[in-house]
Amino acid sequence: MSDYSATDAANGVYDLAVIGAGSAGFSAAITAANEGAQVALIGHGTIGGTCVNVGCVPSKAMIRMAEALYGAQHAASRFAGISGQAKVENWQQIIAAKDELVTTLRQKKYIDLLPEYNGVAYMEGKASLTPDGVLVGDRLLTPKNTIIATGSYSMLPPIPGIESVEHMDSTAILELETLPESLMVIGGGVIGCELGQMFARAGVKVTICCRSRLLPEAEPEVSEALQSYLEDEGITVCSGIGYQKIEQDGGRIKLHCESKNGPHTVEAEKILVAAGRRANTDGLNLEGVGIETLRNGGIQVDDRLRTTKPGVYAVGDVTGRDQFVYMAAYGAKLASLNAMNGDSMVYDNSAMPWVVFTDPQVAGVGLTEADAKSAGFETKTSILPLDQLPRALAARDTRGLIKLVADDKTDVLLGAQIIAPEGADSIQTAVLAIKHGMTAKDLGETIFPYLTTAEGLKLAAQSFGKDVTKLSCCAG
């Protein structure tokens, strides 16, 4: 690759073209450049993609802000002898601080990185695939291989009237210059729960509406617990409803729905639509070059991230699965190495952690009890309420539980879920346990530091065979 010339670049000849300049795109481009490849990184819109600009970074900054509010407001109920108070003093300053963080990280983690990699040529434009290569504007590139990393976008649910009302997605709602009096959230998934709680803590009257239950892919016990904690904070949760229609009525939005208790109407000043995301494939000409898609719109790939067109790979949200930024970056690295070195790397999500940044946080890895049974396992489960965890007792916050799923025959751990104030950081212990095939007995005999949330995994593992309420501190 050292004989690459300016003439090659001028003629659009590259070892790899990466369509999409978000986390996955940068991961793919940097990996290939480190392998000595000449890469065309094609961006369209704001560089950096969803995570840094409108997703993970801004939303988690705002969630932490809301946690500070909640912590101060409820300090007296948790700890004797103290009092605290906090409120939103200037919403515009909060938004400005969030924007400043986004701008800083976009500059440091994306824009400033480009000059560090001589093998990466960044170009801006709308890209599409042709039988001869990749068309960027009116320029044709002829790469040896191509990686599609164009991400996803928020989609509208099929509710009659939804397009005629003033709705916001997760991007637009984080740009509001003033707080609304009330907010209706359509969707009880990750985004709906996270942002719904954040706005409620900022003083907004919030109603979350969903067809099934909150976090439908989580364990039922976790979903039920989260709903109870949100309701304790004054959030209304309308779960298991059927949407009939939605309409604008002056300055109010009205959702007409049906539940087991009959028809009813939910009203709010603003509406957040968080009912899922769809692969961003518009304009790529997938059908024209023979690339097949799934029922959910995602690009079909195999375990090497190859699409149905030779020489073209797809990674991240555009595949319609595992829609987490770290999985997008992981998949992009593998696809890039496969494109360079002969498709030897296999995508493995069997020990993929996931996190919901509500408070308490929800995190999981591996199979749920239902999924394990569907896969043919004879299962056993253990549930540890947080009121049995010393860390939670010392912190005066026993909201949550830990659930473990194991193979009843072999004792091998199959899955774990945590709902706890520090659940996000604790789940990685379970990730390693499942990745390395540990048994519940192995986990229960592992040494954990006292007064940590992660210690709950040890206690939950021990609960398969003993009553941990009868153990002294650190015993067992």
Image: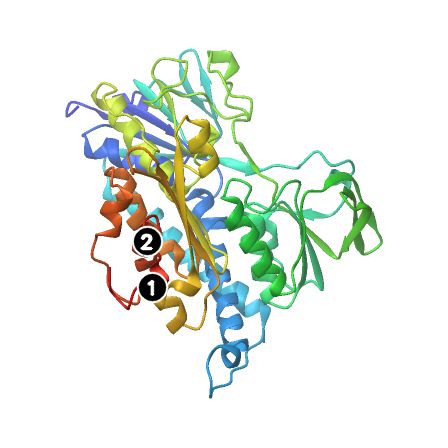
Q: Is residue 150 visible?
A: no
For the residue carrying disc 1, how many other residues have a C-alpha within 10 Å: few (<14), some (14-19), or many (20+)?
A: few
**Looking at the image, which is closer to me, 377 or 327?**
377
Within the image, what quadrant is residue 376 found in? top left
What amino acid is found at the position of numbered circle 1 in the picture? Lys
Looking at this rendering, what residue extends furthest in the bottom direction? Answer: 81
Is residue 349 toward the left or the right of residue 432 in the image? right
Is residue 366 toward the left or the right of residue 255 in the image? left
Q: Position of residue 63 (x, y in %)?
A: 50, 61
Is residue 335 toward the left or the right of residue 213 in the image? left
**Looking at the image, which is closer to me, 118 or 85?**
85
At horizontal 61% and vertical 54% (from top left) the residue drawn is: 173
At horizontal 46% and vertical 12% (from top left) the residue drawn is: 289
In what element is the residue under mark 1?
helix
Q: Position of residue 48 (x, y in %)?
A: 41, 44
Q: Quadrant of the C terminus?
A: bottom left
Residue placed under numbered mark 2 in the picture: 466
- In three-dimensional space, the C-alpha distance between marks 2 and 1, rounded to whole angstroms, equals 9 Å
Q: Position of residue 6 (x, y in %)?
A: 24, 26
User: Is residue 341 shown above or below 278?
Assistant: above
CB of mark 2 within 8 Å of CB of mark 1?
A: yes
Q: Position of residue 21 (x, y in %)?
A: 40, 37
What amino acid is found at the position of numbered circle 2 in the picture? Lys
Residue placed under numbered mark 1 in the picture: 470
User: Is residue 166 shown above or below 312?
Assistant: below
Within the image, what quadrant is residue 47 found in? top left
Q: Is residue 363 visible?
A: yes
For the residue carrying disc 2, how many other residues have a C-alpha within 10 Å: few (<14), some (14-19), or many (20+)?
A: few
Q: Quadrant of the N terminus?
A: top left
At horizontal 61% and vertical 36% (from top left) the residue drawn is: 155
